[in-house]
Image (cartoon, rainbow, N blue to C red):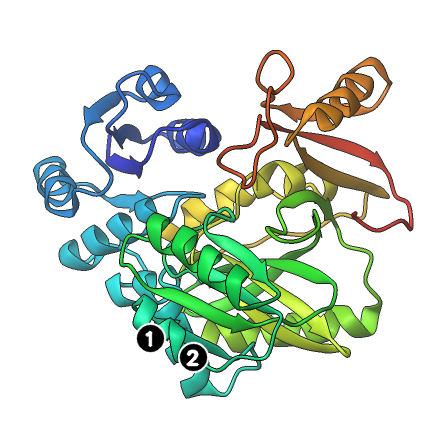
Amino acid sequence: MSNYIVVGGSDLQKDFIEKVKANGFVTHVVDYDESCIGSQIADHFHCLSIDDLEGVLRLAQKLDAVGISTVATEQGNITANYVAEKLNLIGNGFDVSLNTTDKSRMKQVIAAHGLKSPMAEVVLSKEQLSSLEVSFPVIVKASDRSAGRGVALANNREELENFYDESYSVSFNKKVLVEEYVDGPQYSLETISSKGQHQLVAITEMGFSGPPHFVETTHRLPAPVSPKDAERLKGFALDCLNAFDIQYGACHIEVRLVNGAPTLIEIASRMGGWRHWMIESALSVDYLQLILDSSLGKPVVFNAMDSGKVSYSRHIFGANDYQLYLEAKDSKVVMVADLVKENAPTKDATNLIEAHGFYITLEDAETKQCQ
């Protein structure tokens, strides 16, 4: 039997690990946390940090692995592509993984290919920030973090300086983006590619809390968009995939429609968190199988079904969210996934990592939008 490496063993990787096993591979999970769920279900667990590129490379060489991948983790995606490139396995390449993780590099690719995206300045110090001329409001972002960490809306110079400090403190590479604020409905475009052939799998409507942090609170799949907007978003997704030289795997592309025109917020060359549950429940598409097939160089084929149902993901950021979750559990709604922590949260979260968990439901389609 062939060896396959999954980088990361958290709850979000659990189903992918099981998918790899179900396809007959000997599964090897890499994670620094010996108590992670992946350590319990993989055929073999290796206590290595997913940041340890050379350590994972040596493991893959020793195992003569036929494939390596990850889902829903930025650093895991970098490591998987680094190893794949070194061993001539299927992947997008190390530079591609960096370009779709580090937002400062991302902006360079966007500019080189003329994609529509908010203007941004990369700020490396408080001295540079003090001389920066901006038109408020602006978005402040840590260059290399995800899940809403280090993101805030600044309405004046004082807020800009305070939020810069917050973003700088959580950034690994100590780069902060000060970005033009654009308003409009936001969507994530879930795609799959194999040998440079791209397909749009689903469009997700994203719901946010208010400023300053604009935390992702709710996601709806499929999104309630017009056929015209759906075609615009699809075409823009393909343009983004080609610009970033995506060849394989899932991509998660966040876009705003600004006066009807798609505008790229950011792109990740890996699956968006929890999307496989939403896609399978609403569209009957096995997204994880597509990702696995692509990582082995196989063609990816699927037929999305219109079930007349909508999948919602909702995060628990405070006591009110937790109460709504309890009410959902008591109702007749179909609970697709339930990763909510026990007991009500004692304080409000400001990003997805701090959230008290999330749950996914399958409901009858309605015309209301995410809030």
Kindly indicate the quadrant of the structure image that contains residue 89. Answer: bottom left
Which of 140 and 85 lies nearest the eye of the viewer?
Answer: 140
Asked whether the viewer can see residue 134, the reply is yes
Q: Count the marks.
A: 2
Q: Position of residue 137 (x, y in %)?
A: 62, 70
Secondary element type, mark 1: helix
Which numbered marker is on residue 27? none
Secondary element type, mark 2: loop
Q: Which residue lies furthest to the right in this view?
A: 367
- Residue ID at (73%, 41%): 282
Q: How crowded is mark 2: few (under 14 residues within 10 Å), some or many (20 or more)?
A: few
Q: Where is residue 118 in the image (x, y as percent from the top left)?
A: 56, 76
**Residue on which disc 1 sits:** 128
- Residue ID at (54%, 60%): 159
Q: Position of residue 271 (x, y in %)?
A: 49, 49
- Residue ID at (67%, 68%): 256
Asked whether the viewer can see residue 299, the reply is no
The CA span between labels 1 and 2 is 6 Å
- Say whether marks 1 and 2 touch (CB < 8 Å): yes
Q: In this view, does 175 lie to the left or right of 250?
A: left
On screen, residue 202 above or below 105:
above
Which of 46 and 318 lies nearest the eye of the viewer?
Answer: 318
Amino acid at circle 1: Gln
Q: In this view, does 185 lie to the left or right of 28?
A: right
On screen, residue 19 above or below 367:
above
- Residue ID at (76%, 54%): 223
**Residue on which disc 2 sits:** 132
